[in-house]
Amino acid sequence: MKPNSLQQLYVEQLRDLSDGEQQIIKALPEMIEAATSSGLKQALTEHLDVTKVRATRLENIFTTLGEKPKGEKCGSSLPGRVYSQFGPQ
């Protein structure tokens, strides 16, 4: 859907951000479990914590705007892109 106003564009972009954050939240626990380095596990765990905070902030923005965070899904899934780039070769 093409936005008809700056407000619609803003909400559309927030929805894309929210979808991306949710995909990261879903993918990181599996990546943490698969990590063999303790440093990498710690870094991914910290990233998951920060991502959850950002997702909560986005939810608050949607509440303030009176909008729902759900919209169209991003074109390709983030976990799929990450796996194809960094998964087993």
Image: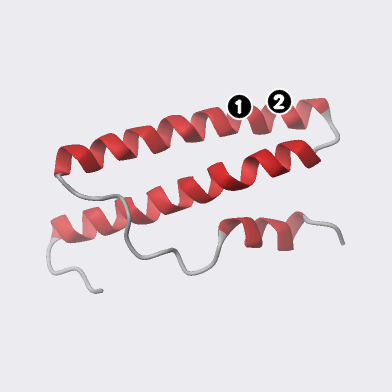
Residues packed near mark 2 inside 10 Å, few (<14), some (14 to 19) or many (20 plus) = few
Q: What whole-number distance in Å separates the C-alpha atoms at marks 2 and 1?
A: 6 Å
Image x and y of residue 67, in percent: 19, 49
Residues packed near mark 1 inside 10 Å, few (<14), some (14 to 19) or many (20 plus) = few
Above or below, 1 against 50 in this view is below
- State the residue position of label 2: 42
Q: In the figure, is residue 34 to the left or right of 51?
A: right
Residue 68 image label: none
- State the residue in front, 25 or 13: 25
Image x and y of residue 89, in percent: 87, 62
- State the residue position of label 1: 46
Above or below, 29 against 19 in this view is above
Image x and y of residue 51, in percent: 49, 35
Q: Amino acid at mark 1?
A: Glu
Q: Quadrant of the N terminus?
A: bottom left
- State the residue in front, 53 or 13: 53
Residue at x 47%, y 52% (from the top left corner): 20
Residue at x 23%, y 54% (from the top left corner): 11
Q: Marks 2 and 1: CB-CB under 8 Å? A: yes
